[in-house]
Amino acid sequence: MDRFNLYAKYYDLLYEDKDYKSEVSYIEQLIEPYGFKKPIEILELGCGTGNHAKLFSEKGYSVEGVDLSSQMIEIAKHKNKGDDNLSFYEGDINSYRSDKKFDVVTSLFHVVSYQNTNEKLEETFKTAAHHLKTGGLFIFDFWYGPGVLTDPPVVREKKLENDAILVNRKATPESDGVQNVIKVLFDIAIKDKSTDKEELIKETHVMRYLFIPELKYMLDKNGLDTQDYYHWMTFEKPTNSSWNVVVVAKKR
Ligand SMILES: C[S@@+](CC[C@H](N)C(=O)[O-])C[C@H]1O[C@@H](n2cnc3c(N)ncnc32)[C@H](O)[C@@H]1O
């Protein structure tokens, strides 16, 4: 197995338990009250390997996906070959510009928390606003500050396995309460079962936890009015134990 295939297998395994199907239905329910006419066009910021996009396409949406990682984009393209409703581009959501305008911009699975400075957050919101038609929606989820501070992350080890690979992943969090970020250091060992060869990967993810007032302020500054925010996958207001919250904002 080459390095690329090893990664592809690792990402598939890592997200195996994630219920993308229910998430796409949930996003549909968030969009529904706004009465967009089908086919609805979505721009997905930080699309990863295209799992949400694929399911949206099956429901008749078209999706343009952007991601910083060339590997993720390669996997997304490979998985969705021949689907004319989908297109994927490598790019930075802080600066990405397409010629098109969309009904909805999504950014799912904590992508906004990866934008860990005020500057990056504002650039991402500018990108979303730039690509929305008037009345279009920006829907994103993020690490919710009150939840993160109430129940801070701890060291976690996870073992994952399928027919091809064995993965051992250790996540060590370091908290920076001045910048409102958690630096998560990942040590990942991926063993190819057919050769017994092990690949070691180190990744650092710097995640910003965010609060509603600062988000509302930054969204508003960029022409986006906050309509609603909920505990992720519900229609309930967040509480201090919510870790993941979704915001629906509308382009003025
Ligand atoms: C946790 S993954 C989520 C991927 C996908 N949305 C999903 O739900 O499977 C976070 C993704 O955000 C992407 N990302 C983070 N910062 C980015 C940026 N500035 N521009 C584009 N993509 C970014 C990463 O490359 C990664 O694919």
Image (cartoon, helix red, strand yellow):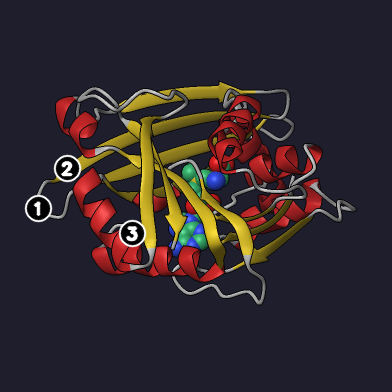
Residue under label 3: 219
Q: Could you tell me which quadrant the C terminus lies in?
A: bottom left
For the point 42% across and 64% down, the residue is 124
In the rendered image, is residue 236 in sight? yes
**10 Å neighbourhood of mark 2: few (<14), some, or many (≥20)?**
some
Sequence-first disc among 3 and 1: 1
Q: CA distance from mark 1 to mark 2?
A: 9 Å
Could you tell whether 1 is left or right of 178 in the image? right
Nearest to the eye among marks 3 and 2: give it.
3
Asked if marks 3 and 1 touch (Cβ < 8 Å), the reply is no
**In the displayed image of the protein, which residue is found farthest to the right?**
82
For the point 54% across and 30% down, the residue is 167
Give above or below for 139 relative to 22.
below
Q: CA distance from mark 3 to mark 1?
A: 22 Å
Nearer-the-camera pick, 182 or 230: 230
Sequence-first disc among 3 and 2: 2
Residue under label 2: 175
Residue type indicated by callout 3? Leu
In the rendered image, is residue 68 in sight? no
Could you tell whether 189 is left or right of 35 in the image? left
For label 2, the SS is: strand
Residue type indicated by callout 2? Ser
Q: Position of residue 172 (x, y in %)?
A: 28, 36
